[in-house]
Amino acid sequence: MHLDAVIRQRGFFLRRRDLLATGFTDTHIRAALAARRIFRVRHGWYSVPDAPEPGVRAVRVGGRLAGLSALETFGIPVPRRNRLEVAVRPTASRLRTPDDRRARLSGSGRTVVHWTDHRSAGLSWRVSVADALVSVLVTETRDVAVATLSAALHHQLVTRAQLDGVFARAPARVASWRSLVSALDEAHGETFYRLWTADVSMPCEQQVYIPGVGRFDFRVSAHTYVEIDGAQHDPDWTGDSASSWHNDLERATAMAIRGDRVLHFGYRQLYGDWAAVLAAVTRAIADDEALTARRRRHPYRPRAPQKRRRSAA
């Protein structure tokens, strides 16, 4: 096999000594470097041009992807963090910046180092899902941690039993968070809404299915529903999937015919003005309760459409 094929087969990153043990020589390595089939990640480490970029950055630092950075590469939609998390061995030295193998890693910047990787970097460029989740429980806030673990459970990257094992390895102070994790959360915005309303004792029922209409994120009262909308709900959405804008309008119309109300909140509102979101939901619940009481006394009877009168010629 070619040298670059061996590197791909062994997990995209190999040390010089591993290549020599495989049977290659320094002459082979120099030839592959000259042909740009491989490149030097850091001193003594080699990779291929199509290697995962987050992995390249982590190995260049001197460790493996950890925490939220690792979980994102497993396909878990995590709350965005403009930083790189790297797990290194407690005895690690000569750490480098993720973008320059010649520059030493300073104490500041957007690289977070976890001195917790007790196993050798070996052939893997990221820690396991379970190890990453433990790191999240140790370093992140309640909201971010619960959202991340809920996403891992929802996307079936961990089982409930494995999640119990993750909490068993985490500090005792986070044990109460286990009951907050929900596989029903389809996005971290839903997790945050669920947690924040629970903090103020506002009830909500999650993932409610309405026959003929579809599922809604939350039902907060008898006739009031809440949807937490990501960017794909925007009419100008340009992602891989189709925009759900028109479908949202049709669903809202169908719910209005039923006598129900759907409140839509975007992530910018949710994170930037939670007080306004909470006030809107509180008012909608109060209005629903008042209207429901009136409907009991005066049931709604739709009027037949009246024919338009023709004007005199």
Image (tube, rainbow, N blue to C red):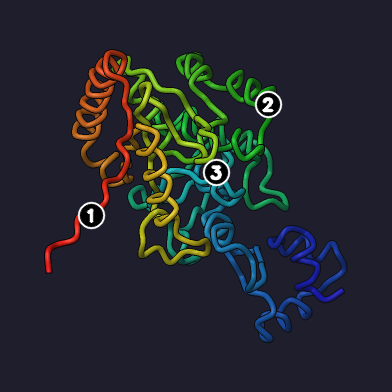
Helix, strand or loop under label 2: helix
Q: Earlier in the sequence, mark 2 or mark 3?
A: 3
Q: Earlier in the sequence, mark 1 or mark 2?
A: 2
Q: From the viewer's perspective, is residue 24 above or below residue 232?
A: below
The residue identified by callout 1 is: 308
Q: Identity of the amino acid at label 3?
A: Ala
Marking on residue 162: 2
Helix, strand or loop under label 3: loop
Q: Position of residue 94 (x, y in %)?
A: 51, 53
Q: Nearer the viewer, residue 158 or 121?
A: 158
Which image quadrant for residue 183?
Answer: top right
Q: Position of residue 105 (x, y in %)?
A: 42, 54
Q: CA distance from mark 1 to mark 3?
A: 69 Å
Marking on residue 66: 3
Q: Residue at point 37% right, 18% down?
A: 203
Label 3 crowd (10 A; few <14 / some 14-19 / many >=20): many
Q: Identity of the amino acid at label 2?
A: Gln
Q: From the viewer's perspective, is residue 64 above or below residue 226?
A: below
Q: Residue at point 25% right, 21% down?
A: 291
Where, quadrant-wise, is the C terminus in this rendering? bottom left
Helix, strand or loop under label 1: loop
